[in-house]
Amino acid sequence: MKPRAALLLPLLLAAPFAQAASPVGAWTGRFDVPIPPLPANLTAQQKAMAAKAIAQIKNGRIYLTLKADHTYSTRQTNLPSLGPASKGTWSQKGAVVTMSEKTPSGQVKNQAFTLSANGKTLAFAMPGGHGRMVFSR
């Protein structure tokens, strides 16, 4: 065996067993969505409503706490359309963190987030390619 290969062999053997970063802790989320230009024919009232909605998206924050007991809770500011805070459970498989919440009707709603390799961001791609929700520590 060549000397360089002998040095790399332990690293290559250990790589499949490397642990993904832990998501446990406090996170602050924001929406990262493209804002298209407004149509030119909007009335002043429509422009004001659009400006308010855009400000909510840009300034809104979601605060997420992932606990070591695999429960989570959220609260949000400036995002009334998201409704009340939520609670549920979470699980991790590699870089995928799945949050599960029971709806009032008893169904389980799952959302899968991707945890960055350095463990500093947690992202969720919104359906239809309409942007992302990004959490950071």
Image (cartoon, rainbow, N blue to C red):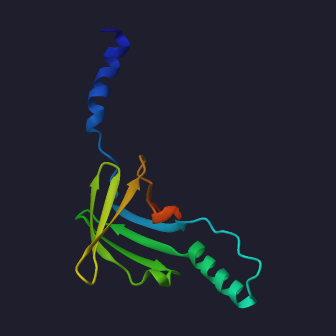
Task: In the rendered view, tell whether residue 8 sits above or below residue 128.
Answer: above
Q: Nearer the viewer, residue 137 or 13?
A: 13
- The residue located at (46%, 67%) in the rendering is 28
Residue 1 lies, in percent from the top left, at: 30, 9
Which residue, as the protein is rendered here, is positioned at the far right? 40
Residue 70 lies, in percent from the top left, at: 24, 64
Residue 106 sits in quarter: bottom left
Residue 92 lies, in percent from the top left, at: 28, 55
Residue 44 lies, in percent from the top left, at: 75, 89
Task: In the rendered view, tell whether residue 46 sits above or below residue 23.
Answer: below
Q: How many marks?
A: 0
Task: In the rendered view, tell whether residue 70 sits above or below residue 16.
Answer: below
Q: Does the rendering let one see residue 66?
A: yes
> Relative to 83, is 52 on the left or the right?
right
Residue 73 sits in quarter: bottom left
Q: Nearer the viewer, residue 110 or 31?
A: 110
Q: Does the rendering let one see residue 126?
A: no
Q: Nearer the viewer, residue 26 or 125?
A: 125
- The residue located at (54%, 76%) in the rendering is 60
- The residue located at (41%, 46%) in the rendering is 117
- The residue located at (39%, 66%) in the rendering is 26
> Relative to 60, is 8 on the left or the right?
left
Which quadrant, please, contains the C terminus? bottom left
Which residue, as the protein is rendered here, is positioned at the far front? 41
Residue 87 sits in quarter: bottom left
Which residue, as the protein is rendered here, is positioned at the far bottom? 45
Which residue, as the protein is rendered here, is positioned at the far top? 1
